[in-house]
Image: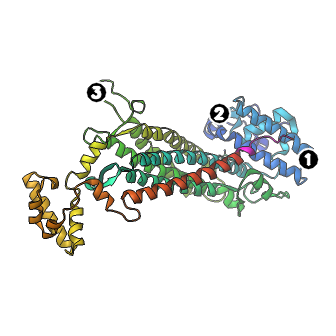
Amino acid sequence: MSSNLPSGGKKLWGGNFAESPDARLEAFNASIFFDQRMAREDIRGSIAHVRMLGHQGIISPAEAAEIETGLWTILAEVDAGEAAFTITDEDIHTGVERRLRELIGAVAGKLHTGRSRNDQAATSFRLWSVGALQQVQAGLLDLRGALIEIAAANPLVVMPGYTHLQRAQPVLLAHHMLAYEAMFARDSARVDAAIRSANVSPLGSAALAGTTFPIDRAMTAADLGFDAITTNSLDAVADRDYVCDALYACSLIAMHISRLSEEICLWATGEFRFIALSDAFSTGSSIMPQKKNPDVAELARGKTGRVFGHLVALLTVMKGTPLAYNKDFQEDKEALFDAIDTILITLDVVPPMLRTARWNEERMAEAAVADFSLATDAADLLARNGVPFREAHEVVGRLVGTCTRENKSFADLSDAEWAEIHPVFAAQKPPLRAIDSVAARDVPGGTAPRQVAAALDTARDALAAEQVALDLDRAARAARFTPPTT
Ligand code: ARG
């Protein structure tokens, strides 16, 4: 009579099993120790399912109400940290049902009508993924805000721009910060795309083929805030594309943060001295009293490895699996959990590290004009006065060679020396200040202060709009996890 009760090592699926599961199988098979992270989403999915069962008359409205009340009780236990799941629960889906049975008795067994753990697991993880990605989005918006603040606070601060990590042409610090903002804005779009990919309801696909019960899939999808329902039951229980999408979005965020972190590490060296990180976001050495290390930037760079790893791991898990559900898919959880945790902890610390850093304007200005960084400006001046650019390049190249041999900079040259180099320079000397060089690059997307100010406005407006949209959607989703008051 009680052969399939999930107690004493017996499983929900134990009806046809004469022996109890081996402890080693149980330890290998169980996902409860990590998938209880999506307990709330699993319970909420069950609430939508049971409401629908009652509404459709598949179970009686009274039974549905009793089950729903029990589920809200379990959700409250989870929120209070009072829910106790054990290895015999196998996974969160089984654990919740076990607890429901403890609370309301045999009627709990009706919850699983017209449903399988396969569509249930996919539903829970999709809901969890949407919430997690929205947290990532909030962190990204904060990071973009920090970059925008630095750009706004330093409208005319110049620094060297590099190619091949060699000084190339001066740029505004604000332009450099907004370059990263542009990367993270694209990352925000990728996170949004990953959310859309996850926000589709597989519930009702059951084990693989759909169900014999007259369920209403649109009703559960709407209750849970999904945008749509999946269109093929086999695909719905076997698809983990949405997890790959999330891992890819996380990977690009990690990659971009890693590039920024590498620059912070460089800029904080005695060789560069462009930035001084605040004590609160630096660490010391146990032996060298003078050391101040950029551990935040280094760790942010280093943590990229595990995020990329999770993407490759899941792609590899998926590649040889036949339709439809396979237990292999259970490997999706830890991959995404750790990738999300890694991104969130990084997004927690990088923005304040940036906001509290001090920029060494003098040092950056000095470096911005060093190594003949204004040579292109001199060649451009010749070209603007009718000299073919290739010839202008040649003339200024020879000048750089002479100056290098004589250990002079452009600023050391007298008017007479300029006039000797080319007649054009007799009438007008090329720009010798980084700010003039920068101001001359007045094309859309260029580093002129006017262009950067416009880019800053655009970035700020986009950020504000995205923040409003995110806040509204998160509030609507949070409200779905609140019990009805009537
Ligand atoms: N814990 C499982 C997972 O993460 C749930 C689905 C189990 N389904 C099954 N048929 N055994 O994938």
> Which mark lies nearer to you, 3 or 1?
3
Asked if the residue at label 3 sits under 8 Å from ligand 1, the reply is: no
- Give the labeled residue for mark 3: 290
- Comparing 482 with 220, the one in front is 482
Three-letter amino acid code at disc 3?
A: Gln
Three-letter amino acid code at disc 2?
A: Ala
Q: Residue drawn 19% across and 65% down?
A: 428
Q: Residue 376, relative to residue 19: is it above or below?
A: below
Q: Decide whether the magenta segment is chiefly helix, strand or loop.
A: loop
Q: Which residues are magenta?
A: 478-485
Asked if the residues shown at circle 2 and circle 1 are in contact, with their CB atoms under 8 angstroms apart, the answer is no
Q: Secondary structure at mark 1?
A: helix
Q: Position of residue 40 (x, y in %)?
A: 71, 40
Asked if the residue at label 2 sits under 8 Å from ligand 1, the reply is: no
Tag shown at residue 23: 2
Q: Residue drawn 32% across and 50% down?
A: 158
- Give the labeled residue for mark 1: 61
Three-letter amino acid code at disc 1?
A: Pro
Asked if the residues shown at circle 3 and circle 1 are in contact, with their CB atoms under 8 angstroms apart, the answer is no
